Amino acid sequence: MSSTTSNPLDLPDTDPFEVADAAAAQIAELTGVERHDLALVLGSGWSKAADLIGETVATIPATEVVGFGMPAVPGHVGTLRSILLPTGKHALVIGARTHYYEGHGVRRVVHAVRTAAATGASTLILTNGAGGIKETWTPGTPVLISDHINLTADSPLEGATFIDLTDLYSTRLRDLARSVEPSLDEGVYVQFRGPHYETPAEVQMAKAIGGHIVGMSTALEAIAARQAGMEIIGFSLITNLAAGIQKTPLSHEEVIEAGRNAEAAIGGMLARVVGAL
């Protein structure tokens, strides 16, 4: 079933977990891989890692899988890729992220994560390109996400579903990442709704409430992943300093350029982390 014409997740009486199960079954059929052990969502600047972590078994357009649509953001490849790791594990690389600001609803934002869990993945690596609040960070700096603040005023959890978010971004996995790359700094990620960039005042608000990184993804996906029982690690690529800290106007073009300039280094780093999992 293709998601190019209609998406069952848009129907209020649809069970999103049943759609995720159906999507996982399609991925198994299309890739020939019955089970995936871990999943990666590769945001702006991170796509090079997919070429470095192992042997690609299959690459499929995301639109061939139920619930998925074409990515609306330049820099996202729109594919699902099955990779055999040197360890013998299989990784599902998701290059088809749906952002909250696209207006499709939270179910579609987190569908990729729920599908990854349904394929068997117990570990999730979330990545993004984001603005940095710490002035010591320069464009191209990779940063571990230690926690998040969700300013979307929304949640992927429906009804009386109470999920503990303590240690959401696994301390164990962050320690492992620093054992691979000791220079990694970390910070709290603040998800805004977007698609406009934050105002300087909003950046100062994020700083005042404990944030170090500002962006438009990741937090909602992490919540859904925790609900699915996955262990999560997150990375932000600092593509620019946030508004008011950086003195020049912000643009998506500089996000793409920073990602392009950093992709070899951060891709290699991420591949080493994956190899240690």
Image: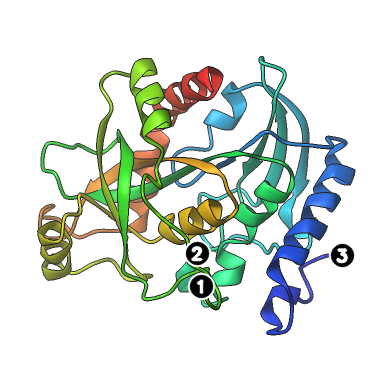
Q: Earlier in the sequence, mark 1 or mark 3?
A: 3
- Looking at the image, residue 185 sits to the left or right of residue 216; the answer is left
Instruction: Give the SS element for disc 2.
Output: loop
The residue that disc 3 covers is 1
Look at 36% across and 53% down and name the residue there.
253
Counting the numbered discs, the total is 3
> Which amino acid, mark 3?
Met
Q: Is residue 180 above or below residue 148?
A: above
The residue that disc 2 covers is 99
Q: Earlier in the sequence, mark 3 or mark 2?
A: 3
Q: x, y (%) of residue 8?
A: 75, 75
Look at 58% across and 22% down and name the residue there.
52
- Looking at the image, residue 260 sits to the left or right of residue 104; the answer is left
Q: x, y (%) of residue 138?
A: 20, 37
Asked whether the beta carbons under mark 2 and mark 1 sit within 8 Å of each other, the answer is: yes
Which residue is more in the foreground, 167 or 207? 167
The residue that disc 1 covers is 102
Q: Which mark is residue 9?
A: none
